[in-house]
Every structure is written in structure tokens, then in C-alpha cells.
Image (cartoon, grey):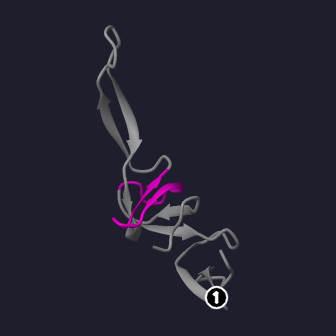
Amino acid sequence: MKIKKGDNILVIAGKDKGRTGKIMKSLPKNLKVLVEGINLKKKHVRPKREGEKGQVVEIPAALDVSNIKIICPKCGKATRIGYKTEGEVKNRICKKCKQII
């Protein structure tokens, strides 16, 4: 998977299309990511103690990797990712500006 925790992304499909966010967690086995403030789902939480009220909490749900594009920190455009090897080091590069991400 070419996307890592901490990358800024743009959502290109789904109900949050056009919104940007930062990746909180990457789930490479499922090819999904969790993004701050994107794809929020409501979860009803039971009261823990007696006398306490239950509540509705919004939590981010996983997005498929195919529905997002990374925003290049150099050129600021939503782009695909490529790889460039220099010796034994494998670097991610922006497909638009050819700079190392």
C-alpha cells in the first residue's frame, strides 16, 4: 500500500468527495485507511455507571484506498504515487512533479 499514516489526502469518491484530511491509521491487510473527520459514523454508547446517560458518539469509519488520492506536499496537487529506487533505498515520488514525498 502506497499511503502511510500522516499523509494528507483528498477523497475522490463517496459521500465525502472533495474533502481533505490526514490519515490517522492505515490498515494494509484490508486496503483501508482511517481519516480524521471523514466518513464519520454514529455509534450509540451505553451508560457505564448507574445514573449516567447513554450518548451518541461520532467515530471515523474506514475508507477504501481506491477512493482517495494523496496530496503532494511539494506541488500541493492530488496525485498518484510512484516509486524510485536509489541504490537500496526505495522512495515514494509524486507522479505530477516527480519530487520525493
100 is higher (above) or lower (below) than 9: below
Q: Is residue 23 magenta?
A: yes
Question: What residue is drawn where x is 51% and y is 69%?
Answer: 3
60 is higher (above) or lower (below) than 93: above
Question: What residue is drawn where x is 38% and y is 71%?
Answer: 66
Label 1 neighbour load within 10 Å: few <14, some 14-19, many 20+: few
Question: What residue is drawn where x is 38% and y is 32%?
Answer: 57
Q: Which residues are magenta?
A: 15-35
Quarter of the figure with residue 29 = bottom left
The percent position of residue 45, horizontal first and vertical second, equals: 31, 28
The percent position of residue 90, horizontal first and vertical second, equals: 61, 83
The percent position of residue 67, horizontal first and vertical second, equals: 39, 67
37 is higher (above) or lower (below) than 21: above
Q: Residue furthest top?
A: 51
Q: Is residue 90 left or right of residue 11?
A: right
Quarter of the figure with residue 92 = bottom right
Q: Nearer the viewer, residue 59 or 15?
A: 59
Q: Is residue 53 left or right of residue 91?
A: left
Q: Is residue 31 magenta?
A: yes
Q: Residue furthest front?
A: 88
Q: Nearer the viewer, residue 12 or 98?
A: 98
Q: Secondary structure at mark 1?
A: loop
Residue type at mark 1?
Answer: Glu
Q: Nearer the viewer, residue 51 or 80?
A: 51
Q: Which residue is mark 1?
A: 88
* Quadrant housing the C terminus: bottom right
